[in-house]
Image (cartoon, rainbow, N blue to C red):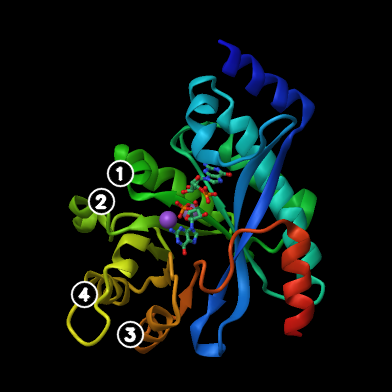
Amino acid sequence: RLAEQDLMRGLEAGEFEVHYQPIVDLDQGGITVGVEALVRWRHPEKGLVPPALFLDLAEQLGQVPRLGGWVLEEACRQALTWQDRHPGFEMNVNLSASQLTNPNLIDEVREVLERTGLPPRDLVLELTESVALTDLVESARVLSQLKELGVRIALDDFGTGFSSLSHLSTLPVDVVKIDRSFVQAMPETGGASVAEAVLHIARTFNLSPVAEGVEDAGQAERLKDLGAGRAQGYHFARPMPAIGVTELLDKQS
Ligand code: G
Ligand code: G
Ligand code: MN
Ligand code: NA
């Protein structure tokens, strides 16, 4: 009851902010080529609250489409400021199940692209396998409409919904984000790994891979050798406020 009121108050007061985690190109020496937008709640008493502590409640209160719509617009505006000096800089935004089933989603994404002027191909919408597979036929329909807008689709936490493999060819997906559990389970030297198998599947279906949860140089090197292409994780950078990404890009160019 109190938590609900607090969250509604926070939404009214605009206490949410978007942080960004760099996505790097392993083949270009680890330069930052894009970011993933991750929402946080700047709570007046509790400080910075991570999404794990409020997204479920926001979902129960039916507020995720509203919050998610705000994140989308904020992230697209921010991406455009970085594109001034880094054309093609990519913005990844997470979509929840309730956003995917929201009949306004397609119009909303189209309008945000129009209002902000972000090139559609530079927006990547991430959804988890479990979200995409709840209603495969409906997901395929909505994703096709999103793709008609020119945006790209990423399957998040890829490999954790193993039963879904047979459906990979059904969904109009462009990118797979390899779950960090597979990255962290890679052997130190030699040996086969689930990460390698998942990369093989990605290649088979012509999907661009992004390895998640890269925490050390050894993992980064092995993923590069396996042809992962892109990666994300604490080894490269943590999620940070927009200003941190601006500074990082300034140093890089
Ligand atoms: O930010 P963190 O580092 O704690 O993210 C935890 C999870 O919260 C992520 O796995 C991500 O899927 C989810 N998440 C973060 N930001 C958003 C958002 O804007 N929308 C949705 N739907 N999920 C998000
Ligand atoms: O949407 P998704 O679940 O993939 O969101 C990414 C989540 O993973 C966020 O909570 C982010 O803070 C977290 N994360 C990002 N990089 C790392 C990492 O290197 N290690 C771990 N353990 N978590 C990470
Ligand atoms: Mn994600
Ligand atoms: Na993920």
Q: What residue does disc 2 label?
A: 161
Looking at this view, is 116 or 238 the one in front? 238
User: In whole angstroms, how far apart are the C-alphas of marks 1 and 3?
Assistant: 28 Å
User: Taking the image as drawn, is residue 253 in sight?
Assistant: yes
Q: Secondary structure at mark 4?
A: loop
So how many labels did they put on this image?
Answer: 4
User: In whole angstroms, how far apart are the C-alphas of marks 3 and 2?
Assistant: 22 Å
Quadrant that contains the C terminus = bottom right
The tag on residue 226 is: 3
- Callout 2 environment at 10 Å: few (<14), some (14 to 19), or many (20+)? few
Question: Disc 1 vs disc 4: which is toward the camera?
Answer: 4
Q: Secondary structure at mark 1?
A: helix
Among numbered discs 3 and 4, the one appearing first in the sequence: 4
Among numbered discs 3 and 2, the one appearing first in the sequence: 2
Name the amino acid, label 2.
Answer: Gly
Q: What residue does disc 4 label?
A: 193
Name the amino acid, label 1.
Answer: Leu
Give residue 48's quadrant in the image.
Answer: top right
Residue 22 is situated, as x and y percent measured from the top left of the image, at 60, 67
Name the amino acid, label 3.
Answer: Leu
The tag on residue 133 is: 1
Marks 2 and 1 in Cβ contact (< 8 Å): yes
Whether the residue carrying mark 3 lies under 8 Å from ligand 2 is answered with no
- Callout 1 environment at 10 Å: few (<14), some (14 to 19), or many (20+)? some
